[in-house]
Amino acid sequence: MLLIPCPWCGPRDEPEFVFGGEPAVRPIPASEVSDETCATYLYARSNEKGFHRELWCHSGGCGQWFLLERDTLTHVIHRSLKPGEPA
Amino acid sequence: MSRLPTGGRIDRAAPVPFTWDGRALSGFAGDTLASALLANGIRVIGRSFKYHRPRGLYGAGVEEPNAIVDLAWGDRHDPNARATLVDLLPGMAARGINAWPNVRHDAHGLIDLAHAFLPSGFYYKTFKSPSWQRWEPMIRRMAGLGTLRPTADTRHFDTRHAQVDVLVIGGGAAGLAAARAAAASGLSVMLADDRPHWGGLLGWHDGTIADRPAADWIADTVAGLGAATLLPRTTAFGYYDHNTVGLLERRATAASGWAEERLWSVRAREIILATGAIERPLVFPQNDRPGVMSTDAVLHYLRVHAVLPGSRIVVATNNDTAIAAALALQAAGAEVIIADARAPGPALRQAADHGIRIHPASVPVGTGGRHGLRWVDIAPRANLAARERIPADLLAVSGGWSPAVHLFSQSGGKLRWDDAEAAFLPGEPRPHQHLAGAVAGDAALAEALAAGHRAGTQAAAALGRSVALPAPRAEPAAPATPIAPLWFVPLKNTRQWIDLQNDVTLDDVALAARENYASVEHLKRYTTLGMANDQGKTSNINGLAALAAFTGRAIPDVGTTTFRPPFVPISLGAMAGLRHGKLYAPVKHLPAHDDHLAAGADMREYGGWLRPACYLRPGETPAAAIQREATAARASLGLFDGSSLGKIEVQGRDAAAFLNLLFYNEVANLKPGRLRYCLILKETGIVYDDGVVARLADDRYLLSPSSSHTAGVLALLEAWHQTEYPHMDVAFHDVTAAWATFAVCGLNARALLTALGTDIDLADAALPHMGLAHGTLAGHPIRIARVSFTGERSYEISIPASRGAALWRHLLDLGQSDAATPYGIETLSVLRAEKGYILIGTDTDGMTLPADLGMPGPLRAKKVDFVGKRSLLAPDALRPDRRQFVGLLPDDPAYIPPPGTHAIETADGARRSLGWITSACHSPALGRSIALGMIEAGRARIGETVQLFHLGHITTARLTAPCHLDPEGDRLNG
């Protein structure tokens, strides 16, 4: 059970959170987005072995979304970032 | 077997009566069920899993492979109780399992005669003719151990969470020394051991610590742990992420006596593993008889329970620890013979000096006695044919000790094979982890104490504390003669058991090697070695060592299988804790809940809410009630409690622009006081939810998602706002529970609301269909929306929830003269089906797009971007043969096709599905059956007849538009 540092509430147990996958920039406008770009945006994930950036929501607490830097191999958590915080 | 007159941790003044297979027996307080059976001379306690061979007790703890029994006590029942872990209580009734009629005389024992046809993987080979399916039911019936009772489990399970500075797993010498040091530093400490008494092996091995008997040191140390959390009878079963450990506590509650289970989820800053080691059996011909036991277990029963399990005992060993046990058995009055696989060392010679007959460099090569050991054949290793038969009623075996590295490995620790110890030892500790004692190869008392103290000190130092206490001292032991690994006896045409519980023999390992299942992971799955509920605690190492021998590899090159939690079986009840029955998924009640009950409502759970399915009059069936209610709602006046329908307020300067981004339909041009039926999509274009969007003001909207999707829609709004559009000024609030909402529909709906006496103008010009008005009723704020899910003129009146029940009663009262009829969800489902209105999740699934539902408009007309827009332009979204929402009228008006019924076409004798029925019912308005479904290119096929297929039964139906009643919508304004 991971101990996840919510940027607002501090370290909390994993069941308080919802995993939101990898952050992606939404491709717009629809008229200029190719089928490949659309499919990549919807389904392709980098799924890195090691350092990984991912979105989590503290749904069982403050309800805020934030970015987490986690190592997918060792579960070492580097830091969490509020949306808009410089990476 | 006999109970000694003195000694042991039992209370001879407190006899405990119990039964075994119906026989009345007696034990003492302090006995386990296993020790009591042993004391009563019960030798056969089970039948082996595959061959149904008689089996007896082998061990004394969690490693026990054989003693699985059916246990009843009062109304409690455990079909697979491990006798070694059961504290004996008066009135316990234990039975042998996996046998008929009983374990002493099991008819299935004949299977053993056919063992040559039942090797590993026999189901792929022997039972292939005429087909495996012919044999499978019979074999499945015979598999398994205990029998479940079909009654509710009355056991009480509990859950606790804890955070602690230092968690020490294992309360033997090393663990106690570690906890002592950590506690002395002032840190919070939790100490867990799976036995009822502290001290681990010191409970039955001699030891002197700081010049005092070990028992005294243990008692003082435990007493001195102060505020530490002490958890005896507690097994740490899993080591999880970020130093989370799962533990199962078997609590002896004073009231019931029965050990109820408590699951602990503990996060520790530092973890000390002092988990000890488990004694391995020797592998030799006929090594599975009742009467063959772990030497250390025999010593345990002798010292802890004062049971001497044999009078003429052969001790077969390859290491020194068993020799000390042999001396203890002789001192207790047994005649003891030792067969040591090694050349004589000091320990063996000392035993001979005590008058014990010794057979150096010798191994057991056979045993006899079907229902209990009667003799053991010993032979020199140099000449296995020179057998000497020794009469004996107990064979205590010791093949060495395997460090209990399970939790270490679960945490990601790597193992290394130590040839000298003939054991897998832990490699580098993981972060925030320390190891001490036999698990790390320091089994001798002096070393275990020193290592434990070191681990406790290091854990404290890691947390910035120092330990001023000196380490506990013990005399170093005399150097032991090294172990001589003896993985099996090299004799052909013999049966040598490796996994007792799953009946896996040496031949099975050889077979696996021959058939190229050379990986240890394949060995495990092919032979099922290590897959029983003892998880190979006494068989894994012997098995992989045999595989190494058969494949010509070194043991470390074979390696171990992956260690996974749980270390011991955990009952599902313990996992659930208190989250069962009403507490599993608490349902929400409507504000008028009690009134619905009083009116005879048939309450069912829908999307987490308890709601009336329909209202039953005396003697009425639900089907009849539904027809009555539906007829009344259209004919005169129907009342529906829609309070569970979602209500989400959306406010802000950018509310309109934001909602326009989220919804498929155009909502920014909605005027205040107007409603629109809208869909909300996922980015894949798939319809997530439908609902009515109401504009209350320029900067304020009220959404009504479906009851089951309210939380999801709110989460969606928050996620998009926070992650993609944080610059937009908009906020959301779930007010579902704040308002009670009732639908009033039918010809007399407006009359009823007029009689209610609100200050809202109900004229059609002021409140047209899909309009919304605010006002008050008796001083309370109300909203009235004119919206219909039934196709009749319909209003939804909302009032603060605290006034809901009163308003419902008032509406019923006022509506009496118009035969106001409350109707439930099932009735609503019929009314909306007649109108072809969709239910999300019933008529839609995880692939449905708006155009499939006949709503292509917004994609063309809506100029701005919205969630899912691009996906609706993908090739798959534009396919002409997509399944589309249509109505169906079965040719037989009495036939109601079950949802899931496929529409089919047949081409070249092959059937192909064209889609399926999603909703179907009897329509009271039309007096016949109607259906809705998703059919390939359905709209183009309206008017055609299709075949319907359900469980082999084929009927026909005509495709129609989804709306079966009043397609012009005249009744909305009726």
Image (spheres, coloured by chain):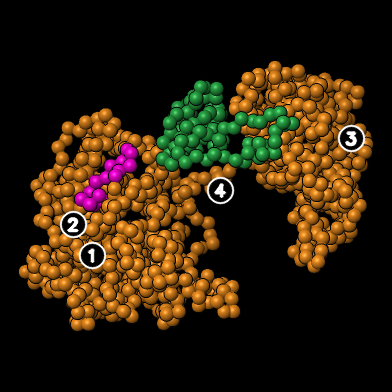
Chain colours: A green, B orange
Which of the two discs, 2 and 4, labels the residue nearer the N terminus?
2
Q: Which residues are magenta?
A: B428-442
Q: Residues within 10 Å of mark 2 (few under 14, many from 20)?
A: some
Residue at position x 23%, y 49% in the image: B437
Q: What element does badge 1 sit on?
A: loop
The image shows residue B80 at horizontal and vertical percentages of: 43, 62
Quadrant into which the C terminus of chain B falls: top right
**Parent chain of label 4:** B
Q: What amino acid type should be assigned to the residue bearing mark 2?
A: His
Is B439 contained in the magenta span? Answer: yes
Above or below, B890 against B873 in this view is below
* Badge 4 or badge 1: first in the primary sequence: 1
**Residue beneath the point at 37% across and 74% down:** B507
Work out whether residue B35 can be spotted: no
B498 relative to B972 in the view: left or right: left
Residue B867 numbered mark, or none:
none
Asked whether the residues under marks 4 and 1 belong to the same chain, the reply is yes
C-beta proximity under 8 Å, tags 4 and 1: no
Could you classify mark 1 by the number of other residues whose Cα lies within 10 Å: few (under 14), some (14-19), or many (20 or more)? some
Mark nearer the N terminus (3 vs 1)? 1
What residue type is disc 1 on? Pro
> Disc 4 versus disc 1: distance between alpha carbons?
53 Å
Report the disc number at residue B205. 2
The residue wearing badge 1 is B485
